[in-house]
Image: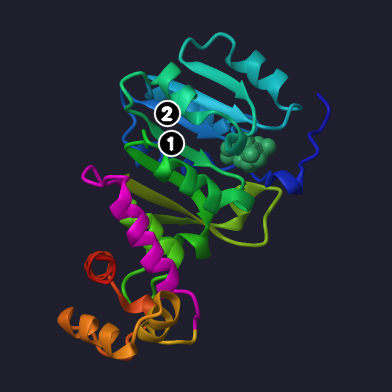
Amino acid sequence: MKKFKHKKSLGQNFLTNDDIIERIVDSSEIENSVVIEIGPGEGVLTEALAGTAQKVIAVELDNRLIPQLQEHFGDYDNVVIVHGDILHMNVEELVSQYAPTGKYKVVANIPYYITAPIIRLFLELSRSPQEIVLMVQKEVAERLSAEPGQMSLLAVSAQYYADVKYLFTVGKEDFNPVPKVDSAIIQLKIKKEISKNEDTKDFFRVVKIGFSAKRKTLSNNLANGFHLYKKDIESILLSLELKNNVRAQELSIAQWQELSQKIII
Ligand code: SAH
């Protein structure tokens, strides 16, 4: 067989360590679940997922990989190979076709160049998955699972929708080709009670403005962004037991929620 030429532009770093593949499957709680896998590559993780999950829907963009995936998984009655770009396809339709109950999970070693858009896509879907388990850059995994004091817009966005947990680190040497950075497995358990409505919009308006200028205090950013008096913002902060000079990265999700309710009336 011809040697596969990996495309950097498609984030192609294939997993080579079976122990890591096993740990991903073990930590995913996918028995009896429909799983969407983004970027199966040559199908090493797909194969392991298929051994446990009820069904695996594997979406691969690179047309060079499709024939071998189709041939390898042709005999599997629980694997479907879909050729397409995960960010430019109708994922809602994919979900209603293969997971009509709306219950499914996402497990993948994804192309890192689209980590944030993939996470946003699945968190914002009207039928979001129950759980997302992803291989991402280690630094991104740390940012996603950050605690108050180290929060970012990315962390607040993810933790608004999900309980985020850093599961384990994966070294560069477990991939081919070997990437420049270490990786980690991150788990997002979607919160059931989250609604996607006007409150969500208001919440993100306040969070985005709160994080707008990195070096400024939260009250400065909010005063500028909402054209409010600083002293009015400070009295809202006081009512939340936050200091005048608090910075956006220090707030918890619950504090952002209270803040957005008090600012947008
Ligand atoms: N899961 C495999 C491959 C990971 S590399 C493994 O662990 O070995 C990332 C994979 O995502 C590659 O196969 C790449 O072709 C694919 N990919 C890149 N961009 C994509 C997109 N927009 N939609 C779907 N798949 C994509």
Q: Where is residue 161 shown, x and y percent of the image?
A: 32, 51
Q: Residues within 10 Å of mark 2 (few under 14, many from 20)?
A: many
Q: Which quarter of the rendering shows the N terminus?
A: top right
> Which of marks 2 and 1 precedes in the sequence?
2
Vertical position of residue 244 compared to residue 251: above or below: below
Mark 1 element type: strand
Scheme of colours in the image: rainbow
Q: Where is residue 18 shown, x and y percent of the image?
A: 52, 38
Query: At 61% from the left edge and 46% from the top edge, which residue is drawn?
Result: 111
Mark 2 element type: strand
Q: Find disc 1 in the rendering and name its residue.
A: 106
Q: Residue furthest right?
A: 2
Residues at marks 1 and 2 touching, judged by CB atoms closer than 8 Å? yes
Vertical position of residue 142 compared to residue 98: above or below: below
Query: At 51% from the left edge and 12% from the top edge, which residue is drawn?
Result: 76
Amino acid identity at mark 2: Val
Q: Find disc 2 in the rendering and name its residue.
A: 35
Tell me which segment is drawn in magenta.
190-214
Q: Nearer the viewer, residue 113 or 258?
A: 258
User: Residue 259's quadrant in the figure?
Assistant: bottom left
Residue 129 seen in the current view:
yes
Residue 166 seen in the current view:
no
Inspect the magenta stretch and tell me whether residue 205 lies in it. Answer: yes
